[in-house]
Amino acid sequence: MKDIRIVVVGLGYVGLPLAVALARKFSVVGLDVNKSRIAELREGHDRTGEVETEILSQSPLDLTADADTCRGADLYIVTVPTPVQSDNRPDLDAITSASRTVGTLLDKPGAIVVYESTVYPGVTEEICGPLLEQASGKVCGRDFFLGYSPERINPGDREHTVDRIVKVVAGQNADVTETLARIYGAVTSAGVFRAASIRAAEAAKVIENAQRDINIAFMNEIAQIFAKLDISVWDVLDAAGTKWNFLNFQPGLVGGHCIGIDPYYLSYRAQQLGHDPQVILAGRSINDGMGRWIADSLHRETGERAGSVLVMGLTFKEDVPDLRNSRVIDVIRRLEELGHRITVHDPRADVEEARHEYGIDLAGDALDRSYDLVVAAVPHAEYRQMPAEAIARLALDGGCIADLKGMWRSLDFGGRIGRWTL
């Protein structure tokens, strides 16, 4: 087992922690086409914050942007992004490109190519396999083999890390499955689960996040209903949560690269098969529309008068720098449409990335001024730990503080400003 050579293709939120974990047991090369990413990782810096500098610096992981140096490995693990296009159709460009690249590297007989990227059932065998064959000139199932092991990385989560979670594995045949079980089993303390097939493993991945999406959509819908009754959904959830089997889902903006994306992969495949995925798409519609609903609600709260607005937080969730598919932008764009002047602050987000992704200039001094409306969109620790006096100073007299996730519910801001929450 120690002689197994592994190449991890794609060193983002998924690939880097996996590569570092595998490098403790095996000879591992991390391959990423982004040369600047490789350069910063060699310096011990992970911009995603998923791997600490000390751990990264001490890791025996080899890093490269040169695919040609990755020939002849025993195992290739593809962990590239699989987003959606502007029309919410699956965007498989990265995974197909990675497949073509890996195909040119398959020099060792019996090599295994494993995909961790989120896909709909059938992509690994029906799309990636043929691409590997074309690029390699070899026969899938004879000269090389396929596998799938869905990623379960939760950005910012220090409890459910790749070395502590159950790893689902599936191979093209029983021998491949067992090989994958031994390799992944060597780096996770939680063990492995052998899925019945590659397609079953692919399907498991998309329903894990589709299930969360649908449950959050229900919470968002009841938040909208209760708003019409002047009831805070947080007060309702406090009471309902005392029941032993009540599920602890919360309303809010649903973004990121998993929950806000994966259901579209499943619905796309369902529609290909002639099935109308009503529940999945209904959930997506509710969650995708939540930002606009919040903005419209806040506009009414201000008496429909456009003014100065501070938006606190731009990343897709708390305590991470990840800006991918952040739905905070929906709130911002709608408030801009309604004439409000927006200032955005985020202590975790990269300034250049925010400008590149959304055309937004983050204001480092934004907390030194006061506004007509303060929107606490992302409950970063830096915001959660602010004293009530500092928060209250952000709002002008007669202004409003909107706390989307209810992180300041217990604080008293005095009577000079209004408050709003879901």
Image (tube, rainbow, N blue to C red):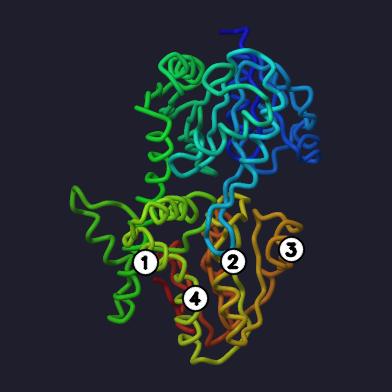
Residue under the point 28% across and 60% down: 238
Q: Would you name the residue on which mark 3 appears?
A: 355
Q: Is residue 57 above or below residue 292?
A: above
Comparing labels 4 and 2, the label whose residue is closer to the camera:
4
Front: mark 2 or 3: 3
Q: Earlier in the sequence, mark 1 or mark 3?
A: 1
Question: Hey, what amino acid is under mark 3?
Answer: Arg
Looking at numbered disc 2 in the image, what kind of residue is underneath it?
A: Met
Q: CA distance from mark 1 to mark 3?
A: 29 Å
Q: Point out residue 272 in the picture as x, y percentages from the top left corner.
A: 42, 53
Residue designated by label 4:
292
Report x, y in % for residue 317.
Answer: 53, 55
Q: Is residue 158 visible?
A: no
Residue 68 horizontal side relative to residue 7, left or right: right
Q: Secondary structure at mark 4?
A: helix
Sequence-wise first label, 4 or 2: 4
Asked whether disc 2 touches disc 1, contact meaning CB atoms under 8 Å apart, the reply is no
